[in-house]
Image (cartoon, rainbow, N blue to C red):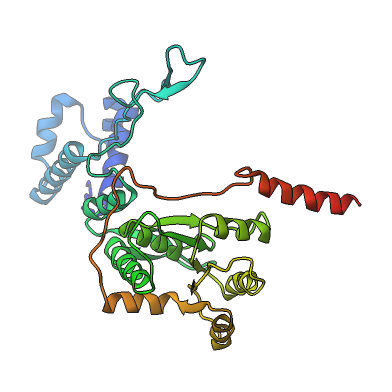
Amino acid sequence: MLTFFLVSGGSLWLFAEFILSLLEKMQTQEILRLLRLPELGDLGQFFRSLSATTLVSVGALAAILAYWFTHRPKALQPPCNLLMQSEEVEDSGGARRSVIGDGPQLLTHYYDDARTMYQVFRRGLSISGNGPCLGFRKPKQPYQWLSYQEVADRAEFLGSGLLQHNCKPSTDQFIGVFAQNRPEWIIAELACYTYSMVVVPLYDTLGPGAIRYIIRTADISTVVVDKPQKAVLLLEHVERKETPGLKLIIIMEPFEETLKDRGQECGVVIKSMQAVEECGQQNHQAPVPPKPSDLSIVCFTSGTTDFLLGIRRKHLWKFLE
């Protein structure tokens, strides 16, 4: 006697996939022979010999397969031919452009409601239904997630906290971020976008000379760092009067109170990121979103200026001597 059972959830789709795959790969006679069913001419007599329970099971299986076939996920269609994603621009000497778009004009945005980085995030918040946004984990541990709304709230709190610490909601306000990739980096970046401030990444791969140069050139008064050690490095520059404009350092991770005292001696306020967010939550300011034409981020590279190149040459000549 044939035995049928029903499955649900993800197993249902796997079972249906298996059945359809089996039907595609096997001839009808082979299926009948495998199931030990009679030839098609005797099929009616065969079904009349089955019990009511078995017939109900067969009907349920057929209904499941029919439902899956009509509701199975459809593959997303690419926006263009993946074998021809770009085309040569006429009279450009070989330059190419994306075929996505209405003409040779540069594509400034893909969605009308996502013309700035702030709007891109808000669109994600809307279409995700407050889904998971930023994930992080420790080694050999499962991911933990911050939802879109949690990230949006923290960004507004941090941005409001920056405004309470003499930062301006303007593209003339440059905020340095000196940290490795982590959720707080994105939250700090989004805080700047939420209040029309400009993000300036800092990194020590080019040496301390690059950090001094970026802080001075961008006239940065506030820097967000991940570790206390980086705060110490920035304080050393201030103590040597190399970056006198730096007034506020915000640290993501816990630090000792003695670091605050050291900062106070050279005129730099040391705050935890949590404390700045709490300050912003208590003094929340409405977002001041940027315009599409506003500056968003300034990234310095090893080839940005001859100054940095000169630093490397100087170190190289000392090495050769």
Residue at the limit of the structure toward the top, as seen here: 91
* Of residues 217 and 12, the one drawn nearer to the viewer in this rendering: 217
The x and y percentages for residue 71 are: 18, 40
The x and y percentages for residue 212 are: 62, 61
The x and y percentages for residue 193 are: 35, 56
Residue at 35% from the left image edge and 73% from the top image edge: 161
45 relative to 116 in the view: left or right: left
Residue at 65% from the left image edge and 73% from the top image edge: 236
Residue at 21% from the left image edge and 31% from the top image edge: 38
Is any part of residue 315 visible from this angle?
Answer: yes
258 relative to 136 in the view: left or right: right
* Of residues 136 and 172, the one drawn nearer to the viewer in this rendering: 172
Q: Quadrant of residue 230?
A: bottom right
Vertical arrangement, residue 159 with respect to residue 306, above or below? below
How many numbered marks, from 0 up? 0
Residue at the limit of the structure toward the right, as seen here: 321
The x and y percentages for residue 300 are: 56, 49
Is any part of residue 8 visible from this angle?
Answer: no
Residue at 29% from the left image edge and 36% from the top image edge: 110
